[in-house]
Amino acid sequence: MITQLAPAFLLSLKVASWACLIALVIGVLLGYTLAHWRWRGQALLDSLLLLPMVLPPTVLGYYLLVVLGRQGWLGQWLESWFGVRLIFTWQGAVIAASVIALPLVYKSARAAFESVDTQLEQTAQSLGLSACAVFFRVSLPLASRGILAGGLLAFTRAFGEFGATLMIAGSIPGQTQTLSIAVYEAVQAGQDTLAAWLVALMSLTCISLLLLAQRLMPRALRQI
């Protein structure tokens, strides 16, 4: 039983970790930018960034296939110039999970940055700190708890991602078969005992991460 559980579990951790890291970097930068600057069309950008939260994962998977597939503009470019193919690879699963997880980091990061006292940032600038220094020495530390909570939520979401991952990466045991895909295939094959163990493992992992995120998330962010 353990030999059947371990590969899918470890792959899910690997995919979720990379996806969370990518979502954190992009989400924090976007959250900070949209929290501090206002421009025409910002509402449209905000809606596009939150779109993965409401679109079915299979729809997102289709969009990714159009972009990253062998006939897609980015997929063709990567293959012709670098010999890189993302379809049916664990790297493709990372990209799918990153897209799904990004809104959770972005929303938490933006709310966290908006909760930072702007007077502290202005005081730091008046003392001669550059904008980059203010970000790393003032804004980011003060918003870190909310960002970390968003990162944990993103990791949990990426860990359990199914629809977009299946369309992009497929289900190759030991290579692209994540825990959620393994559950689906175990049920389809009538392996109820294996499916129950997989579900229990996934549920325990996600509940633990959600409890940790609740402890880290500032009270103001929980009301958003």
Image: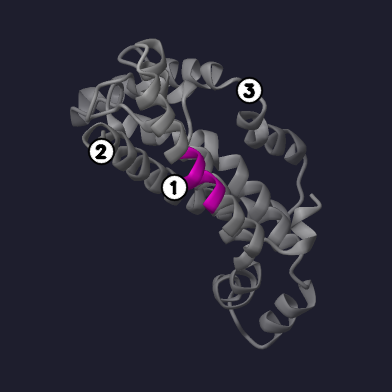
Which residue position is annotated with label 2?
Answer: 2
Determine contact: label 1, label 2, CB under 8 Å.
Answer: no
In the rendered image, residue 224 lying in the magenta stretch gets the answer: no
> Given the current orientation, which residue lies at the most extreme bottom position?
127
Magenta-colored span: 202-208
Q: Main secondary structure of the magenta part?
A: helix
Count of numbered labels shown in the rendering: 3
In the rendered image, residue 204 lying in the magenta stretch gets the answer: yes
Dot 2: element: helix
Establish if 11 lies above or below 165: below
Residue 133 in which image quadrant: bottom right
Badge 3 or badge 1: first in the primary sequence: 1
In the image shown, does 71 or 14 lie closer to the viewer? 14
**Amino acid on which disc 3 is placed:** Leu
Q: Nearer the viewer, mark 3 or mark 2?
A: 2
Q: Which mark is residue 55?
A: 3
**Amino acid on which disc 2 is placed:** Ile
